[in-house]
Image (spheres, rainbow, N blue to C red):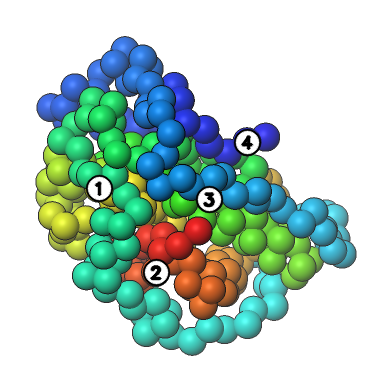
Amino acid sequence: MGCAITGMMFSCDSDNDNESTNANAVKSLNINPYEDPLGYKKENISSTGKKGNIPGGERHHDRISINPVGPLREVFNDSNKYQYEWAEKFGIRPIGSLAGAYRTRRPLRLVTSCEAYHVDELTHSYPYLVPEAEDLLRKIGYNFIDSLASRGADGYKIKVTSLLRTPATVKKLRRVNKNAVDSSTHQFGTTFDLSWSKFYCADPDRTINEEDLKNLLAEVLQDLRRQKRCMVKYERKTACFHITVTQP
């Protein structure tokens, strides 16, 4: 099952601001029917398929082995200033409303729940990313699933909590989240947030300790960060990893 495609948009959020985003308009919006000026080609990303030795039966917040990466606030401390430079390089020009997606300089991919990740209800963003960012998101998702399987567990996926924003959604978000800034990299379609406190669980009778899941995700992010695939900011108040793509 594919994760995201460029094309028809279907509403995945409940943001009812003053933008022209009613359900009919959203469902009829076609995104970027032209070639990418940067010539980026979709990366072939999938799970390794290696399941390891995964025991059956119920699990109740079972522990898994973790390789600590260090204090998360110190390890993942890539500031907005540096993330912004990469966002400008790879991203779209910020759009005033969703209708502006017709005229972006880069194609956007629809981001919906799939086998690699789960998209949470979006209240202050829209389900789109530039191709490099969606490939990175898929890579993180599959690496998390494979890493979990190597520790003898399954049934979990990362949870995406924020994607493409407009100035209007940023302004609305700032009313409830003081961490949101006017110069948000989310406006470029290069950035997404992953929850570190909540994960998608396929079976409530087979659960893993969420602190272990958080640290497992940190392992995955640190590996990709060392490969210079992304920049990451650990956000404590909003319980998420704020991630910007830096190269294919």
Residue 227, compared with residue 31, is above or below; it is below
- Which mark, residue 2? 4
Q: Position of residue 234 (x, y in %)?
A: 37, 71
Find the distance from the CA under tag 1 to the CA under tag 3: 18 Å
Which residue is under mark 2?
Answer: 231
Q: Is residue 102 left or right of residue 43?
A: left
Find the distance from the CA under tag 1 to the CA under tag 2: 16 Å
Disc 4 element: loop
Q: Nearer the viewer, mark 4 or mark 3?
A: 3
Could you tell me if the residues under marks 2 and 3 are in contact, i.e. CB atoms within 8 Å? no
Find the distance from the CA under tag 1 to the CA under tag 4: 25 Å
Q: Tell which circle, 1 or 4, labels the residue nearer the N-terminal end.
A: 4
Q: Tell which circle, 4 or 3, labels the residue nearer the N-terminal end.
A: 4
Which residue is under mark 3?
Answer: 135
Disc 2 element: strand
Disc 3 element: helix
Judge the density around disc 1: few (<14), some (14-19), many (≥20) Cα neighbours within 10 Å: many
Which residue is under mark 1?
Answer: 187
Could you tell me if the residues under marks 1 and 2 are in contact, i.e. CB atoms within 8 Å? no
Judge the density around disc 2: few (<14), some (14-19), many (≥20) Cα neighbours within 10 Å: many
Q: Tell which circle, 1 or 2, labels the residue nearer the N-terminal end.
A: 1
Could you tell me if the residues under marks 1 and 3 are in contact, i.e. CB atoms within 8 Å? no
Front in this rendered view, residue 5 or 118: 5
